[in-house]
């Protein structure tokens, strides 16, 4: 496989392929089959970031196998989400790993130095939403963004949220994390003039129906400039915010 | 039937029945059968207000029949909800009726003079929620309450809501009417220190699912002092607010 | 922060600020940030009662931390809901705490002496609904209300409920707690002439779908004067009932 | 086809087939194919009643065709449900038909003379449930039962229901028809000591979700001796009640 | 309380109250309050059978307390449903109890000798539905019915069901128990000419959604004479079938 | 575009491309853009049948436009589903069209002569399911299959279904169309030893929820060899059955 | 109100207020009350674009009233969504309006000249999704973006989508509009390295349940960089894409 | 029972019954009752394959009992699905058993030698879907099919799927296994010209709602030739694919 890449690059060097062609060609390319997973080795090129491993439901040795294949192929930044403390310890025994417990994220390699249009503000409604908020925060930091955390600012005590008005108004992107009635996204969406990514969480009881209430609420936000990711999907929000914050900007 | 009432009252007069006994006895009493409906003639005693007719699904002549039976039995205030303009005209031809078009309410008799602990504030999220809000407002006014209307104050432009902070904070009861994401109830519940009755409306599109989104949102309000009535049930909210505003107070 | 309050009070003393202005100003005020939670120190002023801690999903040491911050700021009544026996024991080792096991409630400080318009009656459908009913009952008692418990009065044996007719009819507020078909709220709503707060519970099996059946049933109550809180939300019902029972009345 | 029946009967006459064998054999027998429907000609034998035509979605001429085929084969009692006034008129032009407008039922032939264990009481919650209640009532009457109608007895005015206590307690079977919160079935189930057939109706608004609320409520009835048929299925309830009332009794 | 009963009986004896009046009066009568439950002591009179204890969610000592109160008041047949083996052992240590493990039912006292119109046939779709089917079967047997069990006759192998055609056709009542697609009720409803009580079970996987699929299927049965009880509610079906089988018949 | 095809074919002729390569290459090829639709001109090659136009929501002139583009490109068999009588007439004015009213299908060109492994049997539960069944039947016939129709064989009168046992058992593929409880698929799946395609229909009322009940029922079929298509998707079933019946067989 | 603005601006002029302070202050400011709507006059400052009027459920004269108030206050670009042809004609009679019929959008004023990071590509699954796609497209164009339309590229004919690979890969933002199974968002999300805004549409039949199927599908997209707006909310997607495309760029 | 079979066969031998009659007659025949299950001994004849035991919810000794009854009656190939490792070990102690751990399948007897029209390709979206995919694969292999596994080819990295284009295009049947958004079935359905059986899996989180999202997605596939089995029902898909691949072909 590495042959393919070399071949392409040599063609470029030789002038028989333009840089643009080479770039497009690399985008639609290869992966390595290690039995239980097809490891995608060019995602960094194709989507601008390193491979991400979703650890839930994978055994520690499988995670380790994927990490090692990636390292062997020259990946130098690997993000592992939904990683339990136990699995992190097992991987760490073989491969150096930074572990962020609240976010349940492991990182092989270093965080990218922050760059981009501005700051990503992450607002969370309650103490119980913090785990999802941290997944978003660490994801955005690893990918090279400055992150501002504004936690415990639920709409039922809206003066707490307003104490952070300036941070919200000067953000490049805002991630609004909330369970229960999920109103945070609408209120923030109406205050700010930047894109807002809403993350419903499964926090709540009774008629919250595991995040359904917050999800519907956020989809129905009457504020413009709000879009929604899956319930508890902190990673997805962090990733999307990173993309937006890096629009037209080189690291 | 009037015999029963007389009998009770004469017993009271004669001293063979205490006032309290008579009152309790009247509470569990009669109704008149006019074929298509059992008209409840003592509800004014039992629940403190006149009979209410839910006009949806009833023919104009049925509505008229119920009204006339009530008048013949001495009812002097009859509230008719979900009354179409056409049906109002037909009833009005026979019986004098005030009609409130936005609220789809007809009133036979006069509004009760306002009294109670304080004012009932009715806050509505958007232009399209006004019909439900008016149903609540007219209901409360008919039953003897001063009503303050605060419309078009959805959470996506929360500064509009804050312009009414003083009204909200000095209310005796607040009715929060909202469709779409229904966040208004939570925000108001967190600002005010009086009971909030939330009314989800079926306004919205896509994933609002005819009011389900707003309903769940309101039930999950993380603010204390918020309770909820059925989707679009403006009457129920106005009635409940009236009850609360008249706590321990005589007309 | 205490500076702000002093400043306001001194302005009042000096006559440069009216009492009313001062009160309104304090209502929209501060909180203290202890890392994992923004402790709201003026809620007693703003909403008339002490801070409430929702213990579910918080670690005992976090609960303790919040309690201690509050005590240090002069809070003298702290209600802790959804508190497990284990967490209660751990908090109690440091701070004196009354624990109500059936209600899963802890109380730091004393119950407020009962006052208000009348009694709060709490009716529960079955033995299994008692935990939720007790959460409502203790909440109301802590906040200063006389509570009458009427348990095991499901509608399938409606003569049991009728044996308590006088209590229901003389109540200031009624809380109706029921799972399964949730009909209790409708029947009580039709009998009583005071506000009824309905609490659906997740008790039941098969098609009760974790409280959904009771919730829909209560929302559709054809009786007037009934409003609904979230499934199993005994605290919310007790709090709402307390607000209503204290309408226009000073402690 | 009639040959088959004759053959069987002659075998019985000749003694080569026992009466029991003949009866069982007839139970599993024929139907006539008229293109758009297989008309079941022996249902009277098999299930004890005449054929029933569900008219919704069938054209008047199709209904007429089925009726004529049945008459030609000796059926003398045909029940047609969900029959519109228009279709009834068209059928009536060719075949003599009694039409019950409230119930949307047409009857070819005569009502069976009432017999059975006792009376079937049909209780309905509100004016708007009457159409479904009448479908049940006429069905039961056609099949030979004495029916007692107790309408407009919703649980929110439970004293109305109690005025009919004696009728309910002396019933052989009760059909409880209710929309909205559907609590009627539970209350009646707890009062009576006979089988109760509950029919949820699609009457209601907001969170009644076209009968879902009443359906769940009735399924979760905590009273014993209650079973449920489909939403708005008055015919099904009347048929079931008829079966029960005729247990062990000959016409 | 026993005083009330004596009083009534003496009135009857003295001729100042008719037997009928006395019976009706007893029907609407008393219960004993033992703190955690209001024990209904006259249900045998009111509904014709002994008290039933739903053991799920009750502690063994609570169950024992209820049983002892009942015995002290002269109840001689007590049915305990959803009784675990452990709880059964604990109760049995104090009070003699027959325990039916498959049905999770305990019986204090003796089974009633079978009587009634005919046999109750209980048909179950699969091996996994047997627990619910047995709950129905033992309930019916305890209350005095002859029961015929026809298990493992799912519609996917419909010839198995047909091998029992004669039993189905000669039944007085049939209980059809099925999970998954729940088609058993429809097929049996079309074959038999007696009332069919359908019990959906939560057996199944994937899109069976804990019995919802079977429940909807049974409610939509196109056969007449089918009514439905709650998911997994074997007791409810057995009780209903008992009522029907005893129509017009004395034990 | 036609150039591409010629080029390929000439390469094949010239021997520079194998037939297999040519075939695969054609499979992944072109379409023509006519503004409101990209007409897929090689579907006949790629999927073995002509283009199918789903007419619902398209204007008659758009349908005509697509048909004419196809004809101009040499398509000689075009199937148009969900075609109203009005639209059929308008298309027919310009292009010769056979119209099957019950099935709402239009056909440009001729039916393919039947071939394949055996017959496709289409079983439908009730009169109201016939439209969906006919959509399946005509689709299969157009594509070249012998179809046997077995209608009005719902499971509530299962002897009607058994009268067709031999047809069911000798089928190559069976399509089972049913609304309401959808049990037909399970019963047939248990009787037959060929693949069964189940089509839930939206026929039914009350708790059938527009086909959801039948859909869940069919997905939960405990018979093996049953798979399901979308609600009312008669075309999909006919197409799938055609594919199966033509397995390994040339027209 | 204009006084406030002047006051602020004069303070700035006088140097007593910095430009930044003034800007923040204006952001949290005024609106004008015209009875049926509070017209938000500073949204252009607060969120960077002109006011948007959601015309559904508003009468033509109300729309006109809002437009005129805005024009009188100096708004020079007003976007009106969900505007019917009839309402557009009525508004146009008084105020010059460009009307985009497919998109159901009216524009008072001129389109902003395109600027931003790159192009917005709008991909739509089927002919029937075009109305929603156009709402997104016109919204983005009005707000100043170059838009590329790629329609009729559903995943069932994925080679059609691939013919547009270069456009998708060079986009700044992609909007993926799809009904039915909604897979388009996932496929595009995996191909592109820019943010993807997914819009589920209510197109489809049977088990698409008015867009629910597509909505769930899009939320569950396993591709990173995909977020979702409400069903059929083309405006929301166009607005969000506009925000992202203008990140860090001045018009 | 074996007598019946002998009798039939002797009739055939004697010429008094044709082979065809005998075959049809055997198809509708017997089973053996072993108490907890009616073992179906002729399914091999009736449906062309051996009995399948669904082990979930059955005790190891019950499984063993069924296996032994089958062996005693001459069954030589028994497939056991959802078999845990523990149960497999217990059965294996008595009866020789091959166990496929990933697929949770046990096999008594030998795999059938592959035959049929072509290969069955099984495509799976993610690592976590492999268990369901393997259930399908082993089922198909046991029943005599050549299986090609194409795993980890989710649509978010669609170039991985395209690397297998040739396998997909030359398959006789394809099984598409996917959770989350379930788009795999549509994409494959559009590429291939053979029947596609789609299996939604319960893999996913948040709004995947245990497979509901994938299920709806697959049902709404806009590609023709796709049908769906129950969530996680790998066996059902493998069985259906086997049926199709053996159309018109003898082993």
Image (tube, coloured by chain):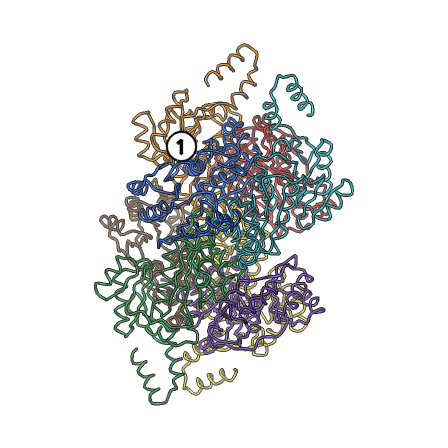
Chain colours: A yellow, B orange, C red, D blue, E cyan, F green, G brown, H purple
The reply to whether residue D60 is in sight is: yes
Q: Residue at x 56, y 14 (%)?
A: B17
For the N terminus of chain G, give its image quadrant: top left
For the C terminus of chain G, give its image quadrant: bottom left
The reply to whether residue C24 is in sight is: no
Foreground pick, A161 / C191 = C191
Residue at the front extreme? D14
Foreground pick, A85 / D175 = D175
Disc tally is 1
Residue F78 placement, left or right of G26: left
Tell me: residue H207, above or below residue G28. below
Badge 1 sits on which subunit? B
Foreground pick, G118 / A68 = A68
x then y, percent, for residue G151: 35, 66
x then y, percent, for residue C21: 51, 35
Residue at the top extreme? B14
Q: Which residue is mark 1?
A: B138
Residue D86 placement, left or right of C36: left
């Amino acid at each position: 496989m590495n042959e393919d890449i070399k071949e392409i690059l040599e063609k470029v060097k030789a002038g028989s392929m333009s840089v643009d062609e080479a770039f497009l060609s690399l985008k639609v390319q290869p992966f390595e089959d290690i039995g239980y997973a097809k490891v995608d080795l060019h995602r960094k090129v194709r989507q601008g970031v390193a491979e991400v491993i979703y650890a839930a439901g994978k055994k520690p040795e499988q995670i380790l196998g994927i990490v090692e294949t990636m390292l062997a192929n020259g990946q130098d930044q690997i993000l592992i989400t939904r990683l339990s403390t136990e699995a992190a310890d097992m991987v760490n025994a073989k491969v150096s790993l930074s572990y962020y417990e609240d976010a349940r994220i492991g990182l092989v390699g270093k965080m990218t130095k922050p760059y981009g249009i501005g700051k990503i503000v992450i607002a969370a409604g309650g103490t119980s939403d913090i785990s999802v908020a941290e997944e978003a925060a660490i994801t955005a930091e690893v990918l090279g963004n400055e992150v501002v955390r504004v936690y415990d600012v639920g709409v039922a005590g809206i003066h707490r949220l307003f104490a952070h008005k300036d941070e919200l108004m000067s953000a490049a992107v805002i991630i609004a994390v909330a369970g229960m009635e999920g109103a945070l996204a609408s209120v923030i969406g109406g205050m700010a003039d930047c894109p807002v990514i809403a993350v419903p969480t499964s926090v709540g009881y009774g008629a919250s129906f595991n995040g359904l209430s917050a999800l519907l609420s956020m989809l129905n936000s009457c504020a413009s400039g709000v879009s929604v990711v899956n319930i508890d999907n902190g990673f997805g929000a962090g990733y999307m915010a990173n993309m937006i914050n890096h629009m037209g900007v080189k690291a």
